[in-house]
Amino acid sequence: MALSDFISSFDALLYHLTGGSSGIGLATAQNFVKEGAFVYITGRRQAELDKAVKAIGLQVKAVRADSSSLADLDRLFAQIKQEKGRLDVVFANAGGGSLAPLGSITEELYDQTFNTNVKGVLFTVQKALPLIPDGGSIILNASIVPLGRMGRPEEIGKAAVFLASEDASFVAGVELFVDGGSAQV
Ligand SMILES: NC(=O)c1ccc[n+]([C@@H]2O[C@H](COP(=O)([O-])OP(=O)(O)OC[C@H]3O[C@@H](n4cnc5c(N)ncnc54)[C@H](OP(=O)(O)O)[C@@H]3O)[C@@H](O)[C@H]2O)c1
């Protein structure tokens, strides 16, 4: 079955992604909408969310939420539950941070890094779980430095759409490297 046939076989694929207002998250949201999904995007900056909603166009709702705040996550998933009742795909993408030599790492930098990249991912998945039906997908975006060139955001988005699809029905717990081969070559 073609991917687009699979996705349109849902009444409406409901897709939530943290950090959807720029970069990989925005491109991935656009890929899912192109396949017929309705997407919820989150981020901390309202102006960026507004721009992303314009760029995506249709089938999108932005909710301002910090994925490291449990109160924000509770509010977000309560809203999705009330509006849609379920969530087919979660793409935990919010992340990043800055590099610093060991001697320059501050408590603030440590907290920023771990709050978004670890705490936020864990509680996003924990709190989304009751809304995810059988056959749903949880996709975590991680980090590595690509070989030769930077990956394009839509290249990650295409891999996320595959992982959420019927074509990946026997794929679970996999670490899929979409990194230009930097970890393998
Ligand atoms: N670009 C790369 O080369 C690369 C390589 C490997 C892995 N990655 C990973 O891919 C993911 C996305 O990277 P990107 O390059 O697309 O980054 P980006 O352009 O900086 O986008 C990050 C997105 O996450 C949001 N965000 C950050 N912290 C958040 C928080 N605590 N709560 C909610 N939203 C938050 C940002 O919006 P706000 O700031 O408004 O919240 C923004 O929408 C990250 O996890 C990154 O580690 C990126």
Image: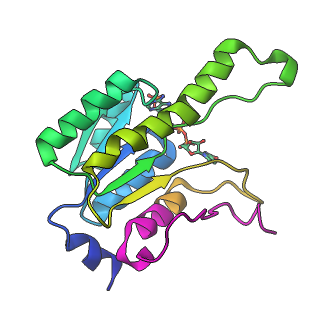
Q: Residue at x 45, y 67 (%)?
A: 163
Image: 32 above or below 6 = above
Q: Is residue 59 left or right of residue 125?
A: left
Q: Is residue 14 magenta?
A: no
Q: Is residue 20 visible?
A: no
Give the percent coordinates (x, y) of residue 48.
Answer: 38, 30
User: Residue 181 falls in which quadrant of the image?
Assistant: bottom right
Residue under the point 43% across and 35% down: 123
In screen coordinates, is 46 left or right of 68?
Answer: left
* Dominant SS type (magenta): loop
Name the image quarter holding residue 71. Answer: top left
Which image quarter holds the C terminus? bottom right
Residue numbers of the magenta segment: 158-185
| Extreme residue in the top direction | 107
Task: Say which of 67 and 161 sits in front.
Answer: 67
Task: Reply above or below: 109 against 88.
Answer: above
- Residue 184 on image: x %, y %: 78, 67
The quarter of the rendered structure image containing the N terminus is bottom left
Q: Is residue 171 magenta?
A: yes
